[in-house]
Image (cartoon, helix red, strand yellow):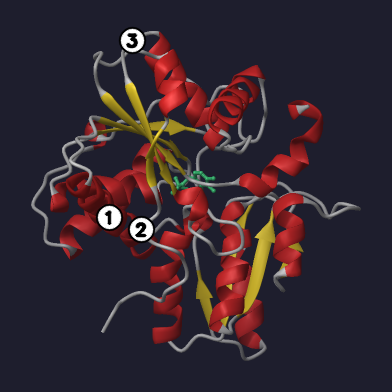
Amino acid sequence: MSNKFDLGFFPTPLQELKRLSKKYPDYTIFIKRDDQTGLASGGNKTRKLEYLIKQALNENCDTVITAGAQQSNHCRQTAAACAIAGLNCHLLLGGEKPDIYDGNLLLSSILGADIHFTGNNRKGEDLETLQNTLEHKGNKCFVIPYGGSNFTGAMGFVNAAKELKQQCNEQNLKIDYIFFASSSGGMQAGLTLGKEIYQLPAKLIPISIDKDETNGLSLENVVLNIIKEGSKKLKIKNNIQLADIYLNRDYDKDGYGVVTTNETEAINALATNEGILLDPVYTGRAFYGMLDFLKKKRIPTNANVLFWHTGGLPAIFKYANELR
Ligand SMILES: *Cc1c(COP(=O)(O)O)cnc(C)c1O
């Protein structure tokens, strides 16, 4: 029996960015289109939710609760997944209730989620309180942590490593570096585990998006904890330490959700050369980081470089002023 509940369109395309590669002649740039995973306009959370929703159903839960920022892609995709699976969905979103719902917040609402606004808390600090309230009313709750980042969610990216390995084999391609936006850690942990299991030779370059800690833990620590649990459960022998977790922190200084000329430059570069849209919070920042690496030749020349597009498009409409 499968341990996942189908929610998306896989495998996602693996494409060469031909025009952009010409502008960086020392490298060949590829893109993995997880912005095309389906599930209410795509994104990397589809992969995690296939495993998380399956677990919720296995445990006979009737309600899913999770948390994030108002423009959380994870929350929007969780709302869609719950609609498909016939589960109630409660979202705890940071900030105060706005007059107008837009971007992901609007979509989460359309998708039928019950939305609770949690002020300064945007990383699931109030999940347990809400769980207690709902269980008191007789619901059976499945709690998905911030970003869907626990071992179950990370399994989506263990599997994604296998998907990429297969595509590389089929296209007779060796990817040397994989750049992606890392924020709640599940994708990074899953790819790290999957790389080992499926012998993907590429080096991961996760670009940190959010400099803030999550419930008192740095992102490096969150990633380490998921990898340790995963290593045990998947029977991978390693003695991974905090110092082994690589995370690039060069581009997160302006803070989460703040759009600077970095993000707009990256969004324009991919849009005008390739007709592909990035988002302002995650992929815009990570793509800028990758282009900066290539410009400065921070990785060896002649490398095949992959950008893992993780989605996030709906948030672009929240940043209309910055992006015009
Ligand atoms: C959640 C998200 C990420 C980061 O993935 P994590 O597993 O949370 O680190 C990257 N890009 C987008 C668009 C996301 O929504």
Q: Residues within 10 Å of mark 1 (few under 14, many from 20)?
A: some
Give the residue type at disc 1: Glu
View extreme (left): residue: 237
Element under label 1? helix
Judged left or right of residue 117, residue 162 is left
Q: Residue flagged by tag 3: what amino acid is it?
A: Lys
The reply to whether the C-beta atoms of the residues labelled 2 and 1 are less than 8 Å apart is yes
Q: Position of residue 204 (x, y in %)?
A: 29, 34
Chain-order first, disc 2 or disc 3:
2
Q: Secondary structure at mark 2?
A: loop
Residue 62 lies left or right of residue 217; in this view the side is right
Which residue position holds label 3?
Answer: 297
Q: Nearer the viewer, mark 2 or mark 3?
A: 2
- Which image quarter is the C terminus in? top right
Q: Which mark is residue 163?
A: 1
Name the residue at 81% across, 51% down.
96
* Position of residue 111 in the picture relative to residue 210 (left or right): right
Whole-number angstrom distance, CA of label 2 to CA of label 3: 31 Å
Q: Residue at x 38, y 40 (%)?
A: 15
Q: Which residue is mark 2?
A: 11
Residue 143: x %, y % from top left: 51, 70
